[in-house]
Image (spheres, coloured by chain):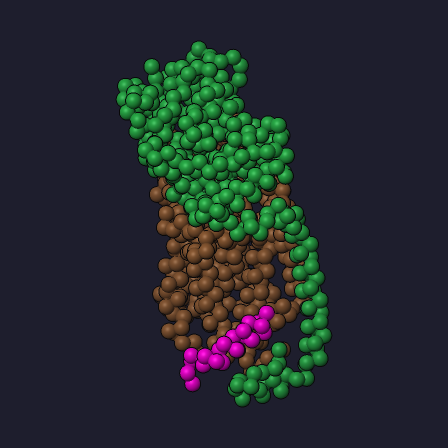
Amino acid sequence: MTNTEPNNTQQAESSAKRSLPIVENFTRRAVVKGGFATLGAAAFVAAVSPLRQAAKSTTAVEFMQQHYTELSPEQKADVIARLEAETKEKYGADVTIADDRPIPGTKFVYAINLSVCNGNGKCVEACHKENNHDRSTNQSYIRVIEMPKGTMDMEKGSTTYSGIVPKDDKFYLPVQCQQCDEPPCVDVCPVKATWKEEDGIVVVDYNWCIGCRYCEAACPYHARRFNWKQPEVPAEEINPDQSYLSNRVRPVGVVEKCTYCLHRTRRGKLPACLEACPTGARVFGNILDKNSNIRWILENKRVYILKEELGTKPAFFYYFD
Amino acid sequence: MSSIPLKQTAITSYPKFIGRALWLATEGSFAFYAWMTVLTAVFLVGANAWANQVAGGMITTNMTDHVSWGLYIANFTFCVGLAAGGVMMVIPAYLYDDEEMHKVVIIGEAVAIAAIVMCTLNVVVDLGRPDRFWHLIPGIGKFNWPMSMLTWDVIVLNGYLLINLHVVGYLLYMRYLGRKPNGWWYLPFVFLSIFWAISIHTVTAFLYCGLGGRPFWNSALLAPRFLASAFVSGPAFIILVMRVLRLTTGYTAPASPARTLIQIIRVAMTINLLMLVSEVFTVIYTGSAHAAPLNYLFFGDHGKSGLVPWIWTAIGMNLVGTALFFTPAALERSHVRILACLLVIVGIWIEKGMGLIVPGFIPSTLHEIVEYSPSLLEWKVVAGIWGLGLIILTLSLKLIVNVFTGRMHTDEPTT
């Protein structure tokens, strides 16, 4: 403390000499202060010790992993092998994680016939199973709103309806990610962990998301979910057919969303919610294909989109017969 | 004698100055050590709670997919206002050459430094994956600038911290050396800090008001309201700090700066309340979709009324506090002044915190009403952040007083 550098001024040197008499006091205080500082540091280490538990589940390789779009094919293969091994280790399930890419010349859109949907909720359940959602919270990407006939105001609807459906004075409005062409969730993400792919699907890199949940606040359709805890799925219930950007078991602390089941749709299959629908209300397809069913519906039916005034340009349509 | 320190000297002596500053700032009476011990204990409780949150997942908070931001972001918003409020000392001191204010302006800057540290911590504890914090660092991460308002906030908050650290550090260092500060070294930063202070709260408001799906936030009045309330809570907090300094260290600030601050509070609070009334009227009278969150906030909705006691407490405190500020007694060193400051600080903490963040999510975008009240763990974490913020503030104020009273001077290394 009282030592001075050789190149310091005369003034400083003289001041150092003048302070000599209290050096003894200084040393005693230094010991006391040092003692308290050590005690404080030790208490801090003890206080944050639960972090060591958390650190165990994160490897250095995972910590250093780059953004999905910057991984080389070899790196991707390594990451996928690691994730498959982790699923085996943590969940006891043998899974295959693919890296399904968009099919060129494809733009996926979805439509629901509100005259037909009867609110049975099979789509909600199918999504839950297909996408390896946490069992205890009964998570799903789809919510169905029971609406009184004669209004489009969701304020008058209910998502917690029960009893036999359909009720005479109600219609049913299933809502999931609208895969917007102007997605506010993508704009707000501070780390580009979510983006829109060429086939229109908005995806999340679960290994890049920092969990700030800004996207969840930005989405006007309540389409995003956060992993408040590590998802729990029994080994025998895990859907082993997975993809990196869609239904692989998500890590804790990150945001996820509907991907139009890209692990199915990019392989020529239909989304799980559509296959599960017993009423045929759901129509899915490539809008760029002139002969597709979905194209015919959009051209010939009275089509409606949710919250059009917000300018999000959904790739999700509702229509009536 | 040049007022710019020689490079070699500054490089070796500035760290030494910091070291001595820390040493002297941790010297004090029994009461000081007791205060610091309490703050440290509170901070440790918060650190432990946060560590448990990271280990167990954010299920340990009471946030949900419906109310996905809660107490942390509420406290963050208030702290941004606190940091921005200090500029109400800088403007009179530097733009209006208020000599008396000039003497104490550094206190406002010290409050800003502690408040910004609290802001950053509030965001960090809200992250689901704090281990991936590096993704936010420009260069090595992927910084979604300029699209994401959160990246703007990262820039303006860190920039404001650096500006204030530089100005406070430089001015104290010069005073410690017994030299006259060279304007070129700090005045440009002071003027920059005026714009910057306004930007931190504007950008923070833009975080919310830019979201079209949240009608409660999606209002052009949000940023002006943020600023008006910041110019109440910030100066009120600084008045409290000056009182505490006078009582504990005997360092008496001149009387006029506090009076100037109270004049500012009178105007800012009136504008704030006027804008609140304007907003409530527009929404309620129109009865549009925007009305649901306000209805929930003020009167409860569908039998759910978790925030009603909060907001009416805040309104009551703000009104009484404002009335007290308009009494002549508030211009004196009175208890009325202190009471008024406490009332508006708590009132704005609720209004800008829980009263602003939570109704943004209730009802949800699909009009579901899921209520939120913070868990014990969240309260502990926020208390811990305040503990650390007050530790930083206490130490910087002690440093300021030590330098200002000449206790810490290059001629007298220790006392």
Residue name at image x 66 percent, y 84 percent: A20
Q: Where is residue B354? Give x, y as percent.
A: 51, 42
Please say if A9 is above or below B82: below
| Residue for point 52% across, 12% down | A164
Could you say where residue A93 lies in the image, as x and y percent from the top left? 61, 33
Spot occupied by residue B391 in the image (x, y as percentages of width and height) = 59, 60
- Which chain corresponds to the colour brown? B
- Residue range corresponding to the magenta coloring: B1-22
- Asked if the stretch drawn in magenta spans residue B189, the answer is no
Q: Nearer the viewer, residue B292 or B204?
A: B204
- Asked if residue B69 can be seen in this view, the reply is no
Quadrant (top left/top right/bottom left/bottom right) for the C terminus of chain B? bottom right
Of residues A54 and B230, the one drawn nearer to the viewer in this rendering: A54
Rendered shade, chain A: green
Secondary structure predominantly adopted by residues drawn in magenta: helix
Query: From the viewer's perspective, is residue A266 above or below residue B92?
Result: above
The question of residue B3 being in magenta is answered with yes
